[in-house]
Image (cartoon, rainbow, N blue to C red):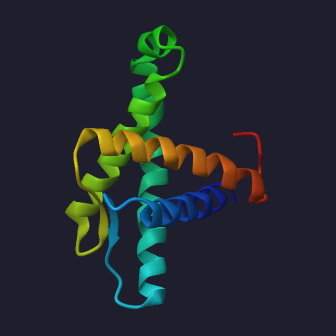
Amino acid sequence: MNLIARIVVTSLALWICDLIFDNLEIYGGDDALGRILVIVGVATIFSLVSMIVKPIVSLISLPLLILTLGLFYLLINALMLWITSWLTDQIGDWGLEVTGGFWWYLWIALILAVLQTVIGWVVPGDKRD
């Protein structure tokens, strides 16, 4: 159940980021249902990347996380967003695209993390994460 709540939170946060930023595009899906399924698919991939790759990268970069007092997490989140963009580009005719380069990944990752936190407070579920 925790994974489903995480995917719902990430879906909402990605959808809001898609509305806010011109440099972020979630493409695919011809109608409303298709669009929702694409957003949920991208959120699922982002959640899985964050669950599998992020702990490994965080462990490897532990000295940098300590040195920067946790600010390096922003760079790690931007990397997770880039990996998600790359993976969805490899899969097919739907996915996530960020144009404009590294700084946009960083900025979108910051807003996405804030939105996930705020939406996570509202969505019921296990709060032990």
Q: In this view, does 62 lie above or below 123?
A: above
Quarter-of-image position of residue 91 = bottom left
Q: In this view, does 8 lie to the left or right of 21?
A: right
* Residue 7 location (% of width, % of height): 57, 60
Q: Is residue 40 at least partly visible in the picture?
A: yes
Write the residue at 42% across / 81% down.
35
> Which residue is more in the foreground, 105 or 49?
105
Percent x, y for residue 102? 26, 39
Left or right side of 65 for 96: left
Q: Quadrant of the N terminus?
A: bottom right
Q: Which residue is drawn at 49% across and 52% down?
A: 47
Q: Where is residue 110 in the image (x, y as percent from the top left)?
A: 48, 41
Classify residue 27 by image quadrant: bottom left
Image location (x, y in percent) of residue 116: 60, 50
Query: Is residue 51 visible to the viewer in this orientation of the structure?
Result: no
Would you place residue 72 above or below residue 117 in this image? above
Q: Does 35 appear above or below 30?
A: above
